[in-house]
Amino acid sequence: MRARWLVFLLCAPVLAYAGAGEHGDPVASVILVVTGLFLCALLGRYVAHRLHQPGVLGELLMGVLLGNIGYFFGSHLIIILREGPAIFSIVQDIFNGFSVTAAVHSVIANADDAQSIISVLSSVQNIEYLKIAYIVDVFSRYGVIFLLFMVGLESSFTELKHTGSESFKVALIGVVAPMILGFFVAFGLLPDASWQTCLFVGATLSATSIGITARVLADLKKLKTREARTILGAAMLDDVLGLIILAAVSSVITQGSINPWGIMHIAVLTLLFFAGVLLLGPLILQKAIYFFRFLPLWEAKLVVSFLFVMSLAWLASYIQLAAIIGAFAAGLLINDSYFELGTDKNKTELNIWQLISPLASVLTPLFFIVIGLQVKLETFFNKPVLLLAAALTAAAILGKLISGLGANKKDDAWLIGIGMLPRGEVGLVFASIGKTLGVISDALFSAIVLMVVVTTFIAPPLLKIRYAKKQQ
């Protein structure tokens, strides 16, 4: 009973906002919604914890629940938030002189969804919902930047160089096989889809969530096993390869055609970006640390890390790579050794991960709950969508299980393949970028999210079962 009241108390502010009037403070509505969404995400994580599942699944499913219940009850705010990145285009068109009706129809293809949004925005007072949705989306984008920065912090360029040929082969197979399978699944089941859409679906299936896999292996106390080292090494390489593929595919989509020279340009640009970060990054960090030496060490770590990740995220975006590539590169490069100058007064017990993780803990859940809000369950009443989701899930599982063939013959190939299964936050990041680029429809987005949920759900129990069987 108490749990039911807790659900109501945490989620009511967001759902109830649909009927709220204007506030004296123009920021009050944003504070209410962002705080309400964060509390809902925490509740989702709590439920996932009680069910022994990754917290990201709880945040995602809470977003799905909140979005569809709010839509069912006619929440104006939820109707806007469900459209995700499309809100940026609507706002831009309105500022460019389009009427609300024209702006919505130019962005939202589904007639029913477009009419719902037009009805909400028909009142001048309700235009405030655009502001709230815009700011919520900005917060969620900060969340994904910090998420990839934290993933990078758990890795390093040195570790990537020493993961060995086995991890490289597992990663390569684990990227190529799902991408090919995903492309042909989309090509076969989406006859009206463009080749760009099929290509992006394949790229989305290639991702692996190192965070979820590492957490499961740690919980099982298997991080020191040969298979675990191979899995984690492959997952780190998988992140790098996946981000390079994401950059290349995104560029191909924006250019509208396959241009071998363009793809080579992106690949070279990506390599130059990482090379430049590797060569110039340490020098820049040393100069920045020297400049901020007037700050306490813990504060200098926080400030320099924040400026470094944001600068590289902006730089990556500026040269037409994804901002998350810059965030990941920043995490790979920076470490506490840059700040330790050899004297006791220049040492602190707090490391960079501990200082940045509070920011990630607040902002990253917003990304996942916003992603969940965009999942429209009504699309699953369409049999082709369910068939597509099932086919994508099968391709995602098969493609990663095959990757175990690249492991050492002495290792358990099935175990390594299972460890590569979770798509988790990385798959959601890819899907959200595809939606932003306009190549992922609502139905396809929902199918991809279902694939992410299934692969993330099944990996932990399968790893436990496989390790138990191996010990027999």
Image (cartoon, grey):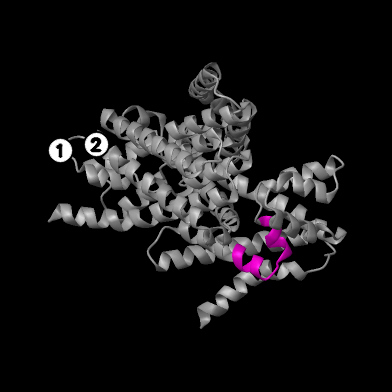
Residue 153 in percent (x, y) is at: 45, 39
Give the vertical position of 162 relative to 174 (above or below): above
Residue 387 in percent (x, y) is at: 45, 53
User: What residue is rendered at 56% in x and 36% in y?
Assistant: 194
Main structural element of the magenta stretch: helix, strand or loop?
A: helix
User: What residue is rendered at 39% in x and 49% in y?
Assistant: 422
Return the mark for residue 410.
1
Residue furthest bottom in the image:
1
Give the vertical position of 386 relative to 416 (above or below): below
Give the vertical position of 254 relative to 450 (above or below): above
Pick the residue in front: 300 or 279: 279
Residue 344 appears anywhere in the view? no
| Residue 338 lies in the magenta-colored region | no
What's the distance in space between the residues labelled 2 and 1, CA to CA?
11 Å
Return the mark for residue 405.
2
- Image-based side of 99 in relation to 111, left or right: right
Residue 439 in percent (x, y) is at: 59, 40
User: What residue is rendered at 41% in x and 55% in y?
Assistant: 454
In contact (CB < 8 Å): disc 2 and disc 1: no
Foreground disc of the pair 2, 1:
2
- Image-based side of 206 in relation to 360, left or right: left
| Residue 77 lies in the magenta-colored region | yes
Res 114 → quadrant: bottom right
Q: Which residues are magenta?
A: 67-81
- Image-based side of 189 in relation to 104, left or right: left
Amino acid type, residue under disc 2 in the picture: Leu
Pick the residue in front: 336 or 434: 434
Q: Earlier in the sequence, mark 2 or mark 1?
A: 2
Amino acid type, residue under disc 1 in the picture: Lys
**Crowd band around label 2 with a 10 angstrom C-alpha radius: few (<14), some (14–19), many (20+):** many
Give the vertical position of 376 relative to 441 (above or below): below
**Crowd band around label 1 with a 10 angstrom C-alpha radius: few (<14), some (14–19), many (20+):** few
